[in-house]
Image (spheres, rainbow, N blue to C red):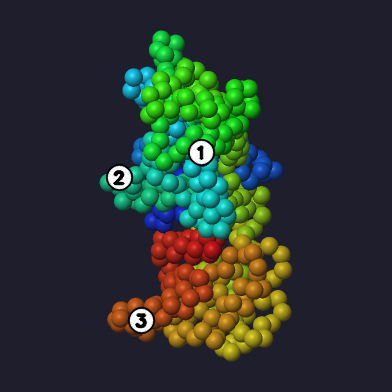
Amino acid sequence: MNEAAAREALLVRAIETTDAGRAVWSDEDRAWATRAAAEIAGSDAAPDAFIARRAAFALERLLARHPAFGRALRAVTWRSWIAPTLAVVAFALGIAADQVGPSHRVNVLAFPLLGLLAWNVAVYALIAVRGVWGLVSPRGRALGPLARAVARLGRAAPREPGVQDAAVSTVLGVFFIEWARSTAPLVAARIGRSLHVAAFALALGAIAGMYVRGLVLEYRAGWESTFLGAEAVRSLLAFVLGPASALTGIPIADVPRLEAMQFGTGGAGENAAPWIHLYAATIALVVLVPRCLLALGTCLAERRLAARLPLALDDAYFARLTRQLGREPARVRVVPYSYQLAPQAVLGLQAIAVRVFGPHVDMSVAPGISWGSEDALPDGLVPAGPLALVAIVFSLAATPEPENHGAFLAAVAALAPGTPVVAVVDESGFRKRFAQQPARFDERRAAWRDLLGARGREPVFVDLEAPDHAAVDAALERSLHAKASE
């Protein structure tokens, strides 16, 4: 999926996973987008093609109803003029910044290009350090101050949405976060390319300015130092300019010649042309060639990522969509623990499954597992074959126990590797007994949150006999997303 299609798909994903109350995008709209995309893409279409087509259909309606979504898409679209503009500005700064000293004298130990040379070597070291650091820690992959400034210029880091509609504002907040996370490698490649090109242009401008001024002015090269003698100066210059000397064939001055060039002893120096050539060649070797290669590498990475932006199409949301494309039923397994589901509760679970996975749902309910049987689960508790979801149902009336409820949750999850497992806490029975005691609800919910949270699970609290579908949708999405993000 290319960048543009991924951008639309993530926006629609943010809408459909955030708008639990269906204030922005109704169930009928969602079903229409799925049908239209399936008809156009065909049942044998690749999942990414179907998802991209569906997002495009959805946004045809959504953009007409909510212009803020169109502004959001434009806000995260990279400004292509950033790199050339930075290059032009850097080249101009390179020309303007080149000043070779008073009275047209050049100190070969304090040549203006030495600072540029040292800065680039430091940047290469920093790139290497951050590259190694990024392999072991996410902090090493974070953007630096200069890169963040370029990101803001390129609209890769949009501000929080200033939209009055609360539902739309919430959607856009989620979208911006997901987009930034999904495109972090692409943005890093674009910023890297822009900065490498700008550094190349800065060095080129400095060299060009020096040669242009040298056409109409005569520069005299010499040196002066409080602490260094001619021999030490010769060794230092051989280290810095040696590769350029070997490349150009221009010899580095020997000790007698350097002694004659010393400004402090009354010498007038010598014509600076050989030194300018040596420093220009050094900058070409140390700055222009490496920066060109780095810019080429980041450009190739950028093109690859923009053409096929990696999205987690196997997450719960996208998996639900692609399952509808093939008309294969979504298999949902319900496993109650120390709890007998009432017929009305089963109907409530069925309604939730249809709302989440669409009309093609094959939901089966396992026989209830008795208290204390978590260490000897029956065969077939979790059926073989691909499952869309395993829902473990607990009762809010039960006091959560790590050695029982927690152990059962871990045991069932181990039977369904790779399958989303959610913990549903049914409030129906507890609500009938303590409807007038909200403090009891809060206390019991907190206990379940503590137990499940310690195991990386987000509980889905629901009255299965009278489910609040908007609240359940939101809770279920949080639970699935939290587990997928581990």
Q: Find residue 229 and report its horizontal and vertical position in percent.
A: 47, 37
Of marks 2 and 1, which one's residue comes earlier in the chain? 2
Q: Find residue 93 and report its horizontal and vertical position in percent.
A: 38, 25
Q: Residue at x 40, y 12 (%)?
A: 217
User: What is the spatial separation of the Cα atoms under label 1 and label 3, in whole angstroms?
Assistant: 78 Å
- Looking at the rendered structure, the secondary structure element under dot 1 is helix
Q: Residue at x 65, y 51 (%)?
A: 327
Is any part of residue 405 visible from this angle? yes
Q: Nearer the viewer, residue 482 or 116?
A: 116
Of marks 1 and 3, which one's residue comes earlier in the chain? 1
Which three-letter amino acid code belongs to the residue tagged 2? Answer: Val
Of marks 3 and 2, which one's residue comes earlier in the chain? 2
- Quarter where residue 461 is shown: bottom left
- Looking at the rendered structure, the secondary structure element under dot 2 is loop
Which three-letter amino acid code belongs to the residue tagged 1? Answer: Ala
Where does label 1 land, which residue?
A: 232
Position above or below: 72 against 217: below
Q: Residue at x 38, y 38 (%)?
A: 226
Q: Residue furthest top?
A: 216
Q: Do the residues under discs 3 and 2 have CB atoms within 8 angstroms?
A: no
Q: Residue at x 71, y 65 (%)?
A: 385
Where does label 2 land, which residue?
A: 163
Q: Find residue 109 and report its horizontal and vertical position in percent.
A: 45, 32
- The local crowd at label 3, few if under 14, some if 14 to 19, many if 20 or more residues have their Cα within 10 Å, is few
Q: Find residue 378 and report its horizontal and vertical position in percent.
A: 69, 82
Where does label 3 land, which residue?
A: 443
Q: Residue furthest left?
A: 164
